[in-house]
Amino acid sequence: MSFSRSSAQSLKQALKATAPKAAGRQIAKRSYTLLAREAPKAMVASRLGATRGVKTLDFAGTKEVVYERADWPLDKLQDYFKNDTLAMIGYGSQGHGQSLNARDQGLKVIVGVRKGGESWKQAQEDGWVPGETLFDIPEAINKGTIIMNLLSDAAQSQTWSEIAPLITKGKTLYFAHGFSVVYKEDTNVVPPKDVDVILVAPKGSGRTVRTLFLEGRGINSSIAVYQDVTGQAKEKAVALGIAVGSGYCYETTFEKEVYSDLYGERGVLMGGIQGMFLAQYEVLRKNGHSPSEAFNETVEEATQSLFPLIGKYGMDYMYNACSTTARRGALDWAPKFKEANLPVFEALYKSCRDGSETRRSLEFNSRKTYREDLQKELDEIDNQEIWRAGKTVRKLRPDANKDEL
Ligand SMILES: NC(=O)c1ccc[n+]([C@@H]2O[C@H](COP(=O)([O-])OP(=O)(O)OC[C@H]3O[C@@H](n4cnc5c(N)ncnc54)[C@H](OP(=O)(O)O)[C@@H]3O)[C@@H](O)[C@H]2O)c1
């Protein structure tokens, strides 16, 4: 693959690389592959005319530099990585999203996963070719110049002793999470002293990394430098952030990224929201409300009506969009919820910071049966009445794709 070609040529190539694979294949339920099949027209087109513009923005009184995609027009990005091979090690949701986004932008990308595993299969479905762009992990590391460690955090620790000797001087070591390096006492991941070590942590699922890119937008990502031996580490982190599909990159440290990330996903983003939904639903059901009423009042109205308003315009806008009755009650009860939740959040932050969450995750996700064990618990959630009721509610939506529910 040549990297000196024009942006227009790379657009053509990117579309060619992705579009034909979409035809005539059965779409697997919930497969990442689903997302790989959309031609990235909007995104690549929007990249062609991009112009430079690093910004210092005021975040509620604190000034921060934000790096944006406009700083890295496609031809500049391709030129910057013209001598590089991005080796994506791992093909979970991040490996999938990041590798396809970089490939669609005309960069030289290869994937490294264990042969015969689920990821090997998925990568082939997405057009990675064994022996050409798909290799086992050691081979991919040997061929790569930028080693993007996107194995599960537990696997990063388990495989480190085999991987570390292959990360030789001149290569760059990249992570999507501060986990392995920050908790090195638990993970044993100590990077070699003579390579740049950087991080790009997309603030969202790998699926969203892909869908936002395909929509011509881009996910927010945190970037950080752990070790800078070339003096170029930060610039490389920003460029890689754009390469994998970020729209905006925010600077942080490995430590702050991992503390906030572990905390957020256990809190409001995932653990907290499931706990809160379930508690509200159960009280409604105990008091004689039907499953549909309890679900609509807890989840459907939240996700379909009110949360999108918070996302688009902020909390006060959402309050104002509701009745005065709703506003009065919500204003009275919000402080009570904050007070009740504060000790839980304090305990959670401490548990993230002191490494307890790391050890729990390493222990569980290092089991041979980690996929099945996690799936068993997720199936239990899927079987909870609240989420079974949700399936029926979702089927009634006019745009429902019944196969995906
Ligand atoms: N997902 C997110 O929302 C998100 C967001 C930001 C950052 N991150 C970070 O991105 C990184 C990757 O996360 P992810 O969610 O994409 O992936 P993941 O689901 O956590 O990991 C999946 C990958 O790890 C491989 N793997 C697991 N055990 C292995 C072992 N013992 N040996 C070799 N390979 C093994 C799997 O291969 P097999 O299929 O062969 O098992 C698969 O390719 C992590 O550092 C994560 O913290 C994730």
Image (cartoon, rainbow, N blue to C red):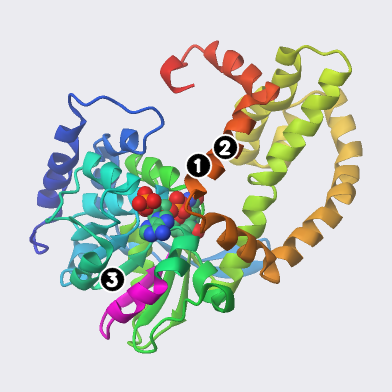
Identify residue type, mark 2. Answer: Lys
Stretch in magenta = 160-175
* Residue picked out by circle 3: 146
- Residue corresponding to mark 1: 372
Q: Mark 1 or mark 3: which is in front?
A: 1
**26 w.r.t. 103: above or below:** above
The residue where tag 2 is placed is: 376
Vertical position of residue 331 compared to residue 399: above or below: below
Residue depicted at 44% across the width and 69% down the height: 199
Quadrant field for ligand 1:
bottom left
Is residue 164 one of those drawn in magenta? yes
**Label 1 with label 2: CB-CB less than 8 Å:** yes
Most foreground residue, 159 or 89: 159
Q: Is mark 3 within 8 Å of ligand 1?
A: no
Question: CB at mark 2 closer than 8 A to ligand 1?
Answer: no
Q: In this orientation, which residue lies closer to the viewer: 29 or 37?
A: 29
Seen at 9% across and 64% down, the residue is: 4
Q: Is 222 drawn above or below residue 115 in the view shown?
A: below
Looking at the image, is mark 3 or mark 2 nearer the viewer? 2
Q: Nearer the viewer, residue 110 or 200?
A: 110
